[in-house]
Structures are given as C-alpha cells and as structure tokens.
Amino acid sequence: MPAWTPETFAGRFIGPKPMDKATIVATARADGMTGRLAEDLIRLAIQAGRAYRWKMPRTNVVHLADTPQPIIGEGNRDVAN
C-alpha cells in the first residue's frame, strides 16, 4: 500500500470534473483505503490547494474538483471555498 499524501490522493481520486465527496470516499475505500484516511486526505488536499469545494445549486452535497469553481456573475464571489 502506498504512503498516501494529499498530493497523491488528489492526483488519483480528484479530477477536473466535480464529484461528490461521498463518491470520492467510496472509490478510495474500494481501492483499499479506510474511509477515515480518505476523509483526512480530502481535508489536507483542500488545505494544500490540491482540491477545491464546489457549491452546486439547490443541494448541500459537497462536490470536489482539482480546479477552483468558476465564478459566474458578479454577486457570487465566494463559490470556490
């Protein structure tokens, strides 16, 4: 089993297309990682700038991608965090 870092985790499980956090964790678990380690690595990847939260309309589900969410409209400046 590799020694996971936030960078290696993001490179393997987080891509340019936003994916909900639960699916990312489930994919990591299917690959042999514990859910707790996956959750910790997601937090660290966000902190390191390797993953970004995306806010989706009409849902509270956390989505993540390896690029910041584009800003749409002038009144919506806090969408990437």
Image (cartoon, rainbow, N blue to C red):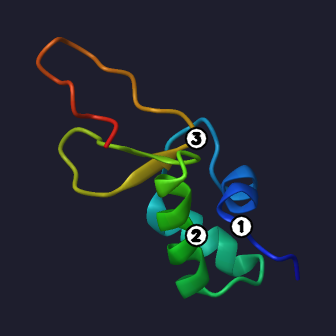
Task: Name the residue furthest front.
Answer: 48
Q: Earlier in the sequence, mark 1 or mark 3?
A: 1
Task: Name the residue furthest left.
Answer: 75
Mark number displayed over residue 66: 3
Q: In 3D space, how far apart are the residues under numbered discs 2 and 1 (Cα atoms)?
A: 7 Å
Q: Mark 2 Cα within 10 Å, few/some/many (few <14, many 20+)?
A: many
**Nearer to me, 58 or 64:** 64
**Nearer to me, 5 or 62:** 5
> Circle 3 sits in a helix, a strand or a loop, which is it?
loop
Asked if the residue under mark 1 is in contact with the one under mark 2, i.e. CB atoms within 8 Å, the reply is yes
Mark number displayed over residue 27: none
User: Exactly how many numbered labels are in the figure?
Assistant: 3
Q: Residue 29: x and y, percent?
A: 66, 80
Q: Mark 3 Cα within 10 Å, few/some/many (few <14, many 20+)?
A: many
Q: In 3D space, how far apart are the residues under numbered discs 3 and 2 (Cα atoms)?
A: 14 Å
Task: From the image, tell me which residue sits under label 2.
Answer: 41
Mark number displayed over residue 5: 1
Q: Residue 49: x and y, percent?
A: 53, 45
At x 22% / y 38%, what residue is drawn? Answer: 57
> Circle 1 sits in a helix, a strand or a loop, which is it?
loop
Q: Earlier in the sequence, mark 2 or mark 1?
A: 1
71 sits to left or right of 33: left
At x 77% / y 76%, what residue is drawn? Answer: 31
For the C terminus, the quadrant is: top left
Q: Amino acid at mark 2?
A: Leu
Q: In 3D space, how far apart are the residues under numbered discs 1 and 3 (Cα atoms)?
A: 15 Å
Whether residue 53 is situated above or below residue 76 in the rendered picture: below
29 sits to left or right of 55: right
At x 75% / y 72%, what residue is drawn? Answer: 4
> Circle 2 sits in a helix, a strand or a loop, which is it?
helix
